[in-house]
Image (spheres, rainbow, N blue to C red):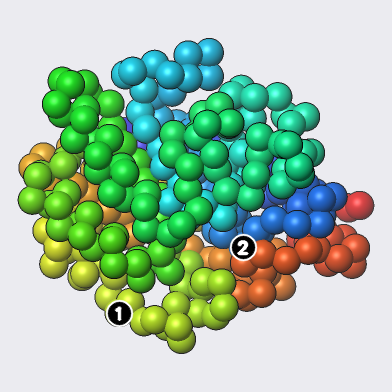
Amino acid sequence: MSLSKARKDYLEGLCQRLRQDLIKLLYSIQTGHPGGSLSSTEIMTTLYFEKLRVDPKNPKDPNRDRFILGKGHAAPMLYQILSERGFFPQDDLATLRQLDSHLQGHPCAKKTCGVELSTGPLGLGLPAGLGMAMAARLDNKDFRTYVLMGDGELQEGIVWEAAMSAAKFGADNLLVIVDNNGVQLDGTVAEIMPMGDIAAKWQAFGWNVISIDGHCVEAVSDAIDLAATVKGKPTVIVAKTVKGKGVSFMEGNSAWHGKPISKDEYVNAMKELGVNV
């Protein structure tokens, strides 16, 4: 069911505030990964505030949906969303990437409430997610498993082994979303290891493919709903995004995969995001 205007406006407003809060946070601690966090904002926000069946008061509910952040470097945005949903106090965000904090540079399932899988090494999210999806089938559970991956992450061979397996076993309770921003750590995906037609690749591996604008909350919501109606095969949503979305000098710039934000850059970024500092 399509989003109502009220829900669409709410999610868009929330995404804007989360972007503002992200820049404030990463500037204050002088570390972190802004680029991939900003490109995946609408995807994760729509999931956590509209679609995922999760309960902060019962985070280990066996019937909960599972979300895996394959591109673990986008942890700052995941942490902001988890705290906004009530999984841990928002004051904890100030400890990001500090010694003894439960909020490290990549998500840790053992220390951080709401994190399903420790991620960082790219490629492990999909095979683990497939395992969760198959476990749901064996246990007669109706939860769904969602894996958010980067397009650079698709260069890992283990991704395609898992993709073949998911198609073979008809894992229709598994949904992959590719944050297709075209940029990775050291340059563009096309420069480093061209992936060609990503949608065609997934289709060739036996997946149902949906292509969308990953910065449109309505498109993300509709695609997730559509995926849930597909039976007998897994679905991948190829979401076209912009790395560093919302801050012009970060957009499409691989340098902003992860680097400290200077005072002038902070002021300019916040102004572009609608806040004078």
- At horizontal 31% and vertical 50% (from top left) the residue drawn is 126
Residue 175 spot, x, y in % from top left: 28, 44
Work out how far the residue at label 2 is from the one at label 1, CA to CA, in angstroms.
Answer: 22 Å
Amino acid at the residue labelled 1? Gly
Residue 12 appears left or right of 125: right
Q: Determine whether 225 is above or below 253 in the image.
A: above
Q: Quadrant of residue 159?
A: bottom left
Quarter in which the N terminus is drawn:
top left
> Which of these two is toward me, 11 or 61?
61
Residue 114 spot, x, y in % from top left: 51, 29
Residue 202 appears left or right of 185: left
The residue at which mark 2 appears reads as: 35
Comes first in the chain, label 2 or label 1: 2
Q: Quadrant of residue 250?
A: bottom right
Would you say the residues marked 2 and 1 are in contact, meaning their CB atoms lie under 8 Å apart?
no
Q: Determine whether 254 is above or below 145 in the image.
A: below
> Which of these two is toward me, 23 or 169?
169
Residue 196: mark: 1
Q: Secondary structure at mark 1?
A: loop
For disc 1, the neighbor class at 10 Å (few under 14, some 14 to 19, many from 20) is: few
Residue 197 appears left or right of 139: right
- At horizontal 9% and vertical 45% (from top left) the residue drawn is 169
For disc 2, the neighbor class at 10 Å (few under 14, some 14 to 19, many from 20) is: many
Q: Secondary structure at mark 2?
A: helix
Residue 2: mark: none
* Residue at the extreme front of the image, as rendered: 100
> Which of these two is toward me, 172 or 238?
172
Q: Determine whether 107 is above or below 36 in the image.
A: above
Amino acid at the residue labelled 2? Gly
